[in-house]
Amino acid sequence: MGERKSRASPKLNKDHSSSRKMSSSSSTTPTAAIVRCPASTLRRLRHLKDREVVTLFTPVVPHPPSTTLAKDMDPFEPLGRALPGLVRHVPYRLDIGMTETHRDHLSSAGAIFVVVCATENITSRNAGALEKQARFASDLQNKVQTSSDLANVPVVVLLVTNGAARYSHEEALKAFPVLVTCEDYTPRPLQGAVHRIFGK
């Protein structure tokens, strides 16, 4: 990916409070919000050590309609580039869910980001898209919570959602202690979400 970041291919074979806070590209159009995040988790994220790996799990989904990225580029690659430090980007497929490959990447993680993409262009094609991604995120979080080696590793769920269903999508993910939202997965909103989390 150009910097010190490793990225798996789509086939997975390569290597503070509870109040909502907004980030916006204009004063009237919010693009990113921290729905909930314990203050201790936010401090942990903002003070990651240089050698700690941020492991990024993203769904294999089509590009958003307004994309300007090359069609052969992963739509979440700009998110990986925006995250600080060492980033390992590992896609996951909705129809397969968590695999041993994903579990293997957890052991080296200093922080974990899981993207759940439920924008209208995705859910209109796949009515079960949100549920499948939520299951992946839940399986991953359960793995983290039951592993003593990962006890202090924060898990951030980034929900990309828009339209009338956005609040029901947030409600569907109420079990996750850390939830951040943005309304599109073009580069600017994704970068805005990173800036909101890391305060930069």
Image (spheres, rainbow, N blue to C red):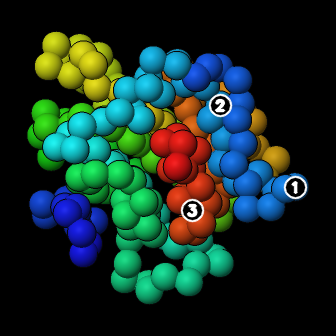
Q: Which residue is mark 1?
A: 28
Residue 152: x, y in percent?
27, 19
Residue 71 seen anywhere in this rendered image of the structure: yes
Report the number of numbered marks. Answer: 3
Q: Which residue is mark 2?
A: 35
Q: Earlier in the sequence, mark 2 or mark 3?
A: 2
Give the residue at x 37% y 83%.
72
Instruction: Describe residue 175's horizontal placement relative to residue 119 as left or right.
Output: left
Q: Which residue is mark 3?
A: 185
Residue 66: x, y in percent?
65, 78
Residue 164: x, y in percent?
82, 47
Mark nearer the viewer, 1 or 3: 1
Q: Quadrant of residue 184?
A: bottom right
Give the residue at x 12% y 60%.
15
- Secondary structure of residue under mark 3: loop
Mark 3: few, some, or many residues within 10 Å (few <14, many ≥20)? many
Q: Where is 105 relative to 183, above or below? A: above
Instruction: Describe residue 107's horizontal placement relative to residue 75 as left or right.
Output: left
Front residue of 81/146: it is: 81
Q: Earlier in the sequence, mark 1 or mark 2?
A: 1
Q: Earlier in the sequence, mark 1 or mark 3?
A: 1
Three-letter amino acid code of the residue under disc 3: Tyr
